[in-house]
Image (spheres, rainbow, N blue to C red):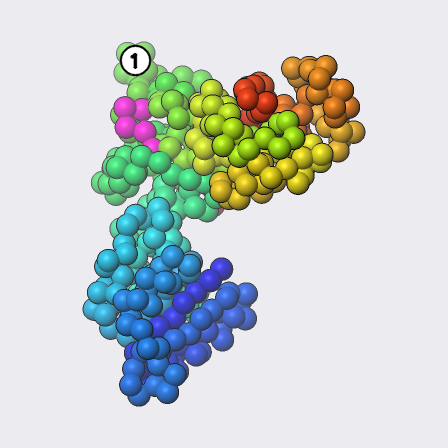
Amino acid sequence: MKAAILCFSLTGYQTGRCLKKGLASLGWEVTLDGKSKYLPDSIEISHQKWTAGQFQNADALVFVGACGIAVRSIAPFVKSKKTDPGVLVIDECGKFVISLLSGHLGGANDFAGICAEILDALPVVTTATDLHGCFAVDMFAKKNSCGIFHMKEAKEVSAALLAGENVGFYSDYPYGGSLPKGLVLCDREGYAVTEEGTAYQEGFGNRKRMDLGIAVTIYEDVLPFPSTVHVVPKTAVLGIGCRKGREEEAICEVSKNCIKAAGIYPESISCIASIDLKREEPGILSLCENWKLPFTTFTGEELLEAEGEFSPSDFVRQVTGVDNVCERSAVLAAGQGKLIQKKVKDCGVTTAMAVREWRICFE
């Protein structure tokens, strides 16, 4: 994790040094800069230009000084709570640590607690769900390493829970423990069910359907509720096979077609997999780099250990010794997972999709 600290006075710089030392001891990569004529190593660029660079590269920004200068510094660069880094403001004496921006998805609230402990300061958190101890869907997504989609509906979920109302909860995956207060377990159609999965009856045998809720799924068309927030885990694996020298454009196009055919969020893909004969294939490596995904390969013998029924190819068997690369590698990289999209073939490229088992964690 990377943190960038900017101080505006001699006293603030001492606070920043203390914070940097404490964060470094926890494994953080920390840069410490000062912007003041009274600091001998003051940066020459403006605090806005400093912010522009750090906003793209750091996981967290810390301004040691007044809130006003922090707000003016970050204002031109604030885009989305899904992508903005966490931003803190600490007074120069190190008495208060304020979570200013991206408290949940950017991790500013948790980071404020860490910094406050290092400085023996008071963390200041203003997000309503934290203050009232309510379930926060964006924090839930972050802690489970999931993406979150339909942010307008996410705000509606928070507002409903803060108002004391219930919201629905559906998941394609099992979970441990009890649902947090305010969440009502529902089926794929948005109807309330018991913990055992049987239909919940209300009134004169009428089933109760929730109007607003959360769906934990990788499928874009799973919409149990009229207003549905999607929490998307990275459980999918894209398996790829291709002819030697196939360009990235063709591999990318067929991969996108596979994702579309499977009906899943591209953000649900955790890695790309293939046979070890393709470990140096330029087109696949370029795709992995552009999509920021790790590349996993298996030997032919390992691929034969994949469990399931696969689409055989005599040509592939002749070249690799295995009847199918894309489906087998996807299943194997998913931990003997379930094949959800069989072979998609075009332009000398084959792709397939599998999902691994996964479990939700409620703290």
Which residue is rendered at x = 42% and y = 59% of the image? 57
Residue 334 visible in the picture? no
Q: 285 or 137, which lies in front? A: 285
Q: Is residue 224 left or right of residue 355?
A: left
Residue 156 in the image, given as x and y percentages of width and height: 25, 37
Which residue is rendered at x = 46% and y = 73% of the image? 20
Q: Which quarter of the picture shows residue 61?
A: bottom left
Whether residue 241 is in magenta: the answer is: no
Residue 280 visible in the picture? yes
| Stretch of the chain drawn in magenta | 225-229
Q: Which quarter of the picture shows residue 208?
A: top left
Residue 138 in the image, given as x and y percentages of width and height: 36, 44
Whether residue 227 is in magenta: the answer is: yes
Which residue is rendered at x = 30% and y = 20% of the image? 209
- Magenta stretch, overall SS: strand
Q: Is residue 62 left or right of residue 325?
A: left
Residue 172 in the image, given as x and y percentages of width and height: 48, 26
Residue located beneath label 1 in the image: 206
Q: Is residue 266 left or right of residue 190?
A: right
